[in-house]
Amino acid sequence: MENFTFYSPTYFVFGKEQENHAGKYVKRFGGTKILIHYGGGSVIKSGLMDRVKKSLDSEGLRYVELGGVRPNPRSGLVYQGIDLCRKENVDFILAVGGGSTIDSAKAIAAGTVYDGDFWDFYKGKPVTKALPVGTILTIAAAGSEGSPDTVITHEDGMFKRGASGEALRPAFSILNPALTQTLPPFQTACGIADIMAHLFERYFTNTKDVEVTDRMIEALLLTMIHEAPRVMEDPNHYQARANIMWAGMMAHNNSCGVGRSQDWASHDIEHELSALYDCAHGAGLAVVFPAWMTYTMKHDVSRFAQLAVRVWGCQMDFANPEATAKAGINALKRFFKSIGLPSNFKELGAREDDIDRMAQTACFGNGRQGTIGGFLKLNKDDVANIYRLMI
Ligand code: NZQ
Ligand code: ZN
């Protein structure tokens, strides 16, 4: 295990009807003038927004609103949010929605207190200062409710890039699994794929002796494999939703990633797809991951075989560990298919003609230096080959 520091100050409030206490938590974490940030309207339709406002009103808190965050959130609304926060002297941002809304809120939070262009953070400048952000999560997926990360697409060039900094960890996050019961099945499945992807990105490491985090990741993957069919069959299954929601937070607040190198090439490869075709991030990952695994498997066959045996219940073939590793990848493919996720370019709406362009942008765009991935470094040709495995 490598040396590490871990700071995860988010105050989590988990369970039924907890959104009704949003005002109390905003006050506790210093908010007096709030920006309520939300997406395309699901939170209005479900009645959640009314309950949140009632809670803020009951605490005597003043607020302004900015809706319209779209999946794969864009820079344009971030600039608008920064202007609004400055004009209205906002001192706390409350994100009500999914990862896209939370990420947009984090970008506004960092940009409002920064003199330069907020996009500097998405070119690699660490975020050290931001307005406090609170979240009320409506989809278990991105893990932004506990992470120090935000992902935004810049409309100028359609670069989808991430920024990070401990200042971006939410002050509090309210997680009521019942709020996720209104999700369409496809979005639920996309969330499941994203959560599993966050675990895979950490599992594939070159660091030795990381038994505790290996086992934590395996436990969370087993939970997802157990709960996914239950929630797909019965969208109102509160307990299955509850386990998925907490797994989603644990998968990405980095408690499973400390002390070990991580990969993240699959996310970089996927971000090109969602930037270009506006597909759901989780759907893109369901196509990318099996291809990335197939391409990189030989780098450490025993790690892939370990995953196959411990998580997918495959029989270890000691004479041919590669066969075991492949069986694990096939099990993952079958699992994604069973919950209605796409498995190739066509089902995702992606085009073979764009492969070179995407590989170029993934490796060189927006200041990148030519390779991606921490487990196995991939150059432009490797990335193009991985895209070809998805056709
Ligand atoms: O916009 P509304 O109307 O709210 O509808 C959303 C949206 O259409 C809908 N939805 C959310 N909760 C709902 C609901 N519909 C009905 N009932 C509910 N309870 O679902 C759609 C998707 O929402 P979105 O916020 O885009 O989903 P998700 O949480 O998957 O976020 C995806 C974004 O997060 C980024 C991705 O790249 C993508 O841009 N990521 C952020 C990370 C982070 N900050 O740490 C890490 C991830 O790896 C990821 O890259
Ligand atoms: Zn993700």
Image (tube, helix red, strand yellow):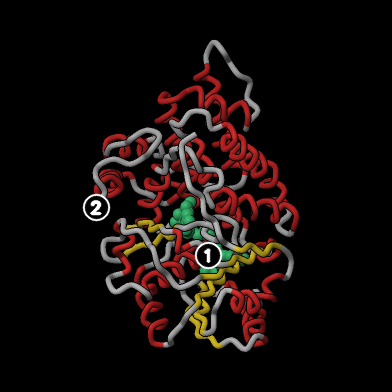
Q: What number is the disc on residue 367?
A: 2
- In-front residue for pair 117/195: 117
Asked whether disc 1 touches disc 2, contact meaning CB atoms under 8 Å apart, the reply is no
Left or right: 129, with 338 as reference point: left
* Rendering coords of residue 107 (x, y %): 40, 68
Q: Is residue 326 above or below residue 110?
A: above
**Tag 1 secondary structure:** loop
Considering every residue shown, the one lying at the far top of the view is 319
**Residue at (62% x, 83% y) in the render:** 56
Q: Amino acid at mark 1?
A: Pro
**Quarter assignment of residue 327:** top right
Q: Is residue 260 above or below residue 157?
A: above
- In-front residue for pair 60/377: 60
* Rendering coords of residue 265 (x, y %): 39, 42
What residue is disc 1 on?
170
Left or right: 193, with 262 as reference point: right
* Rendering coords of residue 304 (x, y %): 51, 27
Q: Is residue 108 above or below residue 145?
A: below
Local packing at callout 1 (Cα closer than 10 Å; few below 14, some 14-19, many 20+) is: many
**Residue at (31% x, 59% y) in the render:** 125
Tell which circle, 1 or 2, labels the residue nearer the N-terminal end. Answer: 1
